[in-house]
Every structure is written in C-alpha cells, then in structure tokens.
Image: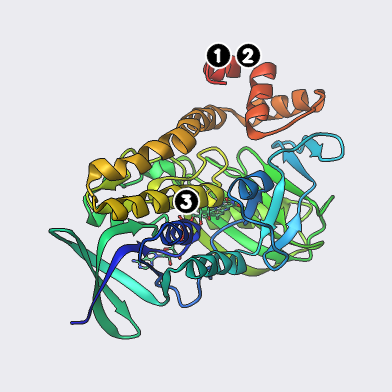
Amino acid sequence: MKLIETDVLVIGAGPAGSSTAKHAALNGAEVILMDKKSEIGSPKRCAEGVSKEGLKKLGIEPNSRWVTKELSGVRLISPNGTDVWMKEDQVKLPEAGYILERKVFDKFMAMDAARAGATIMIKTLARGMRKDHDGYIVSCESMGEDFEIKAKIVVGADGPESRVGRWGGLKTTVKPKNMESGIQFEMVGLEMEDPDVIEFYFGSVAPGGYAWIFPKGDDIANVGLGIVSTVTDKSAYEHIVEFVKNCPATQNAQPVELNVGGDPVGGMIKNLVKDNLMIVGDAAGHVNPLTGGGIITALEAGMYAGEVAAAAVKEDNYTEKRLKEYQEICKKEIGDSFDKYLKTKDYLLSLSDSDLDSIAAAFQDTEFENISTKELIKLLIKVSPKALLKLGKLF
Ligand SMILES: Cc1cc2nc3c(=O)[nH]c(=O)nc-3n(C[C@H](O)[C@H](O)[C@H](O)COP(=O)(O)OP(=O)(O)OC[C@H]3O[C@@H](n4cnc5c(N)ncnc54)[C@H](O)[C@@H]3O)c2cc1C
C-alpha cells in the first residue's frame, strides 16, 4: 500500500487544524492537512460570530469576502421579554465583532496554511492509526483509494465528534451534560428590531443553553439554540420550531439552511498530548463553556500547537514531556478562564425564568460603560446576592 511520510499530520481542516498546519509550516515543519469534506468549511455547523479583538490578537485581517456583518451591539432578552440593549454608540463593547461566512472563512484559513507551505488533502478520511516506534501510521481513504501516512506527530483537529485523541489513548469522552446539542436555521425574511445587533434569549426557550439570532444581512440571520438533552424532554428541533414560531423577529421568516451539531461545553480536556500526538480545537474542549464559542480559541490553540510541533520536529523530540509545553500554554491562555466560565454557566443554569427576568430588570436600571463577558458577570454579581455567593470570589 502507498505510504506517504511527513513530520506533522493534521487531521481536520476546521479553524483549529488550519491554524495548526499554518503555524507548524511557518516554523519549518513538513505538514499535511487533511479533511474528509470535499469542500472545506461546508456544511457549516456554527452561528458564525467572532470578536474583533480575537481576530486582532491572532493577526487575522478581516476580509470582506468572509465578513457578512459588522455588529454594533448586543441585546439580551429574558423569558418574559425584558430586554437589555448594549450598543456601541453608548457602551464600549470590546468583544463586539463580526458574523462570518464560515464556508468562505474556513477555506481562507486553509489557504493560509497552504501558502505557509502545508500540503492540503481534501476528501481524505482518516480511518484509524497505529503506533510506530517513532510516530504513528494513519490509515486513510480518498476517492476510493486506501493509503497510509506516517507522521512524527499526529494532530487531532477533528472537531466535536473527535476520534483521533481516543485512537491514541487520550481520554476525550465528553459527558452528555457537557455536550450541547446545537440546532440552527439560516433564515430570510426576518423582521429584526436592529439588524446590526446580535440577540441572545435566555431561560426555558433553550434548557441548558440559550437561543440566538445572529444577523448576516438586513433580513438574513442564523437563528438557533443549544440545549442539553439531560435537562429537557423535547428535542432540539422541537425547541427551535417553537422558538421560531413565537419570536416576533422570525415569525414570518423562512429557512434556507438547517445546521445541526454538538458543542462540547465542559471545559478544556485535561491531557492534550501523548508521545507523538496532540489534540486541538473542539477535539480538545477549546470551547468557551459559557458562550459555546470556539472559533477564536480553536485558531489560538492551533497557533500554539503548530509552534510547539515545529519546535519538537527541529529538536527531533516527540515525547509527551516535550509536547506538554503546548498543554501548559493552553491551560494558562485558555483553560484557566474556561474554569471560571464553567462555574458561571452552572450558576446561570440553576436560575428559574423568574430569576432571569429579575436580573434583566436590574440590568435595565444599570448604566454600562464597558461591557465584555467578564464585565457582564461582574454586573450579575452586583445585582444578585445569590450570584455574589456563588461567583464572588472568582471574578
Ligand atoms: C450550532 C453551533 C453554533 C456555533 N456558533 C458559534 C459561534 O457563533 N461562534 C463561535 O466562535 N463558535 C461557535 N460554535 C463552535 C464552533 O463551530 C467550533 O468551536 C469550531 O468550529 C471548532 O473548530 P475545530 O477546527 O476544532 O472543529 P471543526 O470546525 O468541527 O472542524 C473539524 C474538521 O475535522 C474534519 N474531520 C473530522 N473527522 C475527520 C476524519 N476522521 N478524517 C478527516 N477529517 C475529519 C471535519 O470534516 C471538520 O472539517 C458553534 C457550534 C455549534 C454546534
């Protein structure tokens, strides 16, 4: 059987994989980036929201080919319809951002990896792997042909249903209570109060998560929700149909796309490396447990993974001990804040609809100056004695 050899094999060309491949190649490693999809980025399983600050931190210039909407504010809606508006002309919103076209964005990220020197293999499925004394041999299939790739380092960037980590013996299983079921329609014909503002709906509309409307055009938006199946008897589909029927903005809108996917919101997985193996992105739990957002952290963790993988190649040292540098950077830059967000999420999920209505009413009476996820939590602690008790020491 054909055998291809490389330094680094990245399995999965989502944001995590493309970023890993780009940074490993930029730092001198020989890299293959593969994805089972015939079109990178499609179908999307994402509401496509990212913060401007996140892209800036990673040095990614916004491009009109993949930014569909620049946002100017946020609207939070409690179960009884009490809404809190935060608009950029009145409040500083450091995390305000863009709605992407992921089908284009993901391809652009893969193109960046190719320009950095990585070899891209589309429509190529990794089926399994076995340990070799100085690496892994991965069984692959592409267009009916079976072949193998031998790599000194394999990077599992294979998303929420990741298997690569498990193949290599890492404990990556996500408990059902930590896997949000996401469902979303891309819709046309919306009647939004302000099509430049993203909307979040809390409470029993989406048990275990929240519902969202992320605008992509004046009457176009991603309308979705995430639920945790252990806290509701209804399916995610039943919840979204009900939400669309009852929400004034979507009552007359029509779907042009349905997206379904899991979002691992249990925090970062403890061990991200083994000898010759790394995991990154959703596969590694690099998803903000509170917001469910994982694009920026996938890109960021990919950058760290790529840099450490390339350094390991230069040193000809692929041991768990050497690759642990990546795990430590991820813990410091991503994992530690995720622990706090996880506790905040657990607290928010303990609130009833009427608790959420009272908090929204208290927020309405508050003057904001600078609002980020962290500032919102601080505000929550200020208006709710129960939150002070549970979260006061964390923030
Ligand atoms: C409904 C929903 C809405 C979301 N909304 C947002 C949002 O608004 N903002 C945000 O930041 N995040 C959001 N997320 C999370 C975000 O989509 C993910 O965190 C992000 O895509 C993670 O990137 P990744 O590269 O780790 O994985 P993915 O983007 O899932 O990429 C993994 C890739 O691996 C490939 N693959 C898998 N197995 C194999 C194999 N065996 N062989 C070859 N290829 C393989 C897949 O084809 C895929 O292309 C949302 C998630 C869901 C489910």
Whether tag 3 and tag 2 are in contact, CB under 8 A, the answer is: no
Which residue type does callout 2 highlight?
Pro
Left or right? Give the position of 388 relative to 91.
Answer: left
Q: In this rendering, does residue 322 appear at all?
A: yes
Q: Is mark 3 within 8 Å of ligand 1?
A: no
N-terminal-most mark, 3 or 2: 3
Q: Residue at x 70, y 65 (%)?
A: 187
Q: Which residue is mark 2?
A: 385
Q: Nearer the viewer, residue 82 or 108?
A: 108
Name the spot of residue 375 as percent of width and height, x first: 67, 27
Query: How busy is the neighbourhood of tag 2: few (under 14 within 10 Å), some, or many (20 plus)?
Result: few
User: Could you give the CA–CA distance between mark 3 and mark 2, rounded to whole angstroms?
Assistant: 40 Å
Which residue type does callout 3 highlight?
Met
Q: Which residue is mark 1?
A: 389
Name the spot of residue 304 as percent of width and height, x first: 44, 47
Q: Which residue extends farthest right?
A: 89
17 in relation to 394, above or below: below
Q: Which residue is mark 3?
A: 303
Q: Residue at x 71, y 29 (%)?
A: 357
Q: Residue at x 22, y 47 (%)?
A: 319
Left or right? Give the position of 203 relative to 72.
Answer: left
User: Could you give the CA–CA distance between mark 1 and mark 2, rounded to whole angstroms?
Assistant: 6 Å
SS label for mark 3: helix
Whether tag 1 and tag 2 are in contact, CB under 8 A, the answer is: yes
